[in-house]
Image (tube, helix red, strand yellow):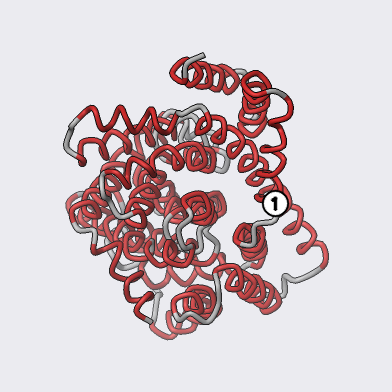
């Protein structure tokens, strides 16, 4: 059986199993098991066992449950509520101030937790009712929360970044630092869009009475809410950038900071820690099962000559390398409408990386471009994950079609951010280069 037929059979089989609703981890594992036994016999299953052991004993992957635990504790600590109240006071006089404050909080949450669902759900519960009560346009409010929440994919510490770095065999620390400037760039684009649009159309974000009674003493007192988040961010990212700690060790620092923040907010108890630990177990198990299934699947793909076949096809095209890069980005956005980002990374990165090396692109730069595309996939209708996270917490009167329409301008802002990073790769590479110089 030729490698082309095997690849076609694997692709068709994966699509059919996913359409049945079977979880991605088990779809990948079942196909890997079937093709391994069919092509090479049962003795070859030892390769799958060895890959599973390698995954489960990875020290780098140990950072995932730690960062998830940090996010779960922070989500229950009450610190996000205090942050939102502070941003509400500081940005209320700015055009579209509550929406701008929401983007700022999403940026801070991304730097503390790196979990997209946590930011979207928290802002959907806290920020959306506040904006709607003050007469904000529904679509502006919904789009801000959706787009702001996805910053957790790019701004470190991001669980998805860890999965990408491990799969691509790139330094997790450099990937973390490389995501800082592009993440802040996207946040800046969102804020600029909100301010400019509300200046042109003041009816989208009324101010007036909402700004009354907001004096400077209240604003300054509210800044106390920034102390603990700033310390956590510095503890995690600062220790990585300065070379004091590895990303895994920095994750443990983050967990300690999250526990301290919960204690200062008087939310720390055995019940809260138990729920956070259970959430950590669920998310970590999901990620590891997908990792095991995808590694086994990709091993079959590579073993049957799939990677060589794809590279040969690219070489035969003789197209401009940026055209090929564009096609890869479109594939990622398309897959994001059906698969979660962990699955896309584990399936696509082993296939794309040889192509990227052949085209002489920087692997670290491509990794950040990949993550920006992942953000776009998260908000792309009809099945972008963030859209459903938000739908789960909005009032029943807000339909899915409203959320779809709300996200359109922010999707194009993400395209703009992607193009900026493609044209000026120094935005991605400068900080990691400084880190390496240290």
Q: Is residue 422 above or below residue 222?
A: above
The spot of residue 113 in percent (x, y) is: 55, 62
Q: Residue at x 43, y 79 (%)?
A: 219
Q: Residue at x 73, y 52 (%)?
A: 281
Vertical comparison of 404 with 94: above or below = above
**Quadrant of the image occupied by residue 189:** bottom left
Where is residue 437? Give x, y as percent: 34, 79
Residue 97 appears left or right of 284: left
- Residue 250 is left or right of residue 352, and the answer is right
At horizontal 81% and vertical 62% (from top left) the residue drawn is 271
**37 vs 345, nearest the viewer:** 37
The quarter of the image holding the C terminus is bottom left
Residue 328 placement: quadrant:
top left
- Per the image, the residue denoted by label 1 is 56
Nearest the eye: 153 or 81 = 153
- Is residue 171 something one can see in this rendering? yes
Q: Secondary structure at mark 1?
A: helix
Question: How many neighbours does mark 1 have within 10 angstroms: few (below 14), some (14-19), or many (20 or more)?
Answer: some
């Amino acid at each position: 059986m030729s490698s082309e037929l095997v690849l076609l059979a694997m692709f068709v089989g994966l699509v059919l199993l996913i359409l049945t609703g079977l979880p991605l981890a088990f779809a990948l594992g079942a196909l890997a098991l079937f093709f391994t036994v069919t092509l090479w016999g049962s003795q070859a299953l030892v390769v799958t066992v060895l890959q599973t052991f390698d995954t489960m004993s990875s020290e780098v992957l140990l950072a995932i449950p730690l960062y998830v635990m940090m996010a779960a504790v922070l989500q229950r600590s009450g610190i996000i509520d205090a942050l939102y109240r502070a941003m509400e006071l500081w940005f209320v006089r700015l055009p579209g101030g509550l929406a701008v404050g929401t983007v700022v909080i999403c940026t801070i949450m991304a730097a503390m937790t790196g979990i997209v669902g946590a930011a979207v759900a928290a802002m959907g519960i806290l920020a959306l009712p506040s904006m709607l009560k003050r007469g904000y346009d529904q679509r502006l409010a919904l789009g801000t929360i959706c787009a702001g929440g996805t910053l957790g994919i790019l701004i470190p510490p991001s669980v998805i970044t860890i999965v990408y770095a491990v799969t691509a065999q790139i330094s997790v620390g450099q990937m973390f630092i490389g995501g800082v400037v592009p993440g802040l760039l996207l946040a800046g684009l969102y804020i600029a869009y909100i301010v400019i649009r509300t200046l042109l159309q003041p009816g989208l974000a009324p101010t007036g009475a909402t700004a009354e009674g907001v004096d400077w003493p209240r604003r300054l007192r509210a800044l106390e809410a920034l102390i603990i988040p700033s310390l956590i961010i510095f503890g995690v990212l600062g220790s990585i950038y300065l070379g004091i700690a590895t990303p895994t060790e920095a994750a443990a620092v983050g967990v300690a900071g999250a526990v301290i923040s919960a204690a200062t907010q008087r939310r720390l108890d055995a019940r809260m820690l138990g729920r956070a630990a259970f959430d950590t177990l669920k998310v970590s198990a999901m990620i590891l099962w997908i990792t095991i299934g995808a590694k086994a699947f990709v091993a079959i793909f590579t073993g049957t000559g799939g990677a060589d076949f794809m590279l040969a096809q690219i070489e035969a095209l003789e197209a401009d390398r940026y055209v090929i890069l564009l096609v890869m980005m479109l594939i990622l956005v398309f897959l994001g409408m059906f698969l979660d980002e962990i699955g896309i990374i584990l399936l696509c990165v082993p296939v794309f990386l040889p192509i990227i090396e052949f085209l002489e692109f920087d692997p670290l730069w491509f990794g950040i471009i990949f993550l920006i595309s992942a953000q776009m996939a998260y908000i792309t209708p009809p099945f972008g994950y963030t859209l459903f996270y938000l739908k789960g917490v909005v009032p029943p009167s807000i339909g899915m079609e409203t959320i779809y329409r709300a996200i359109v301008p922010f999707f194009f802002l993400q395209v703009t951010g992607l193009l900026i990073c493609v044209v000026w790769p120094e935005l991605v590479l400068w900080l990691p280069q400084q880190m390496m110089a240290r």
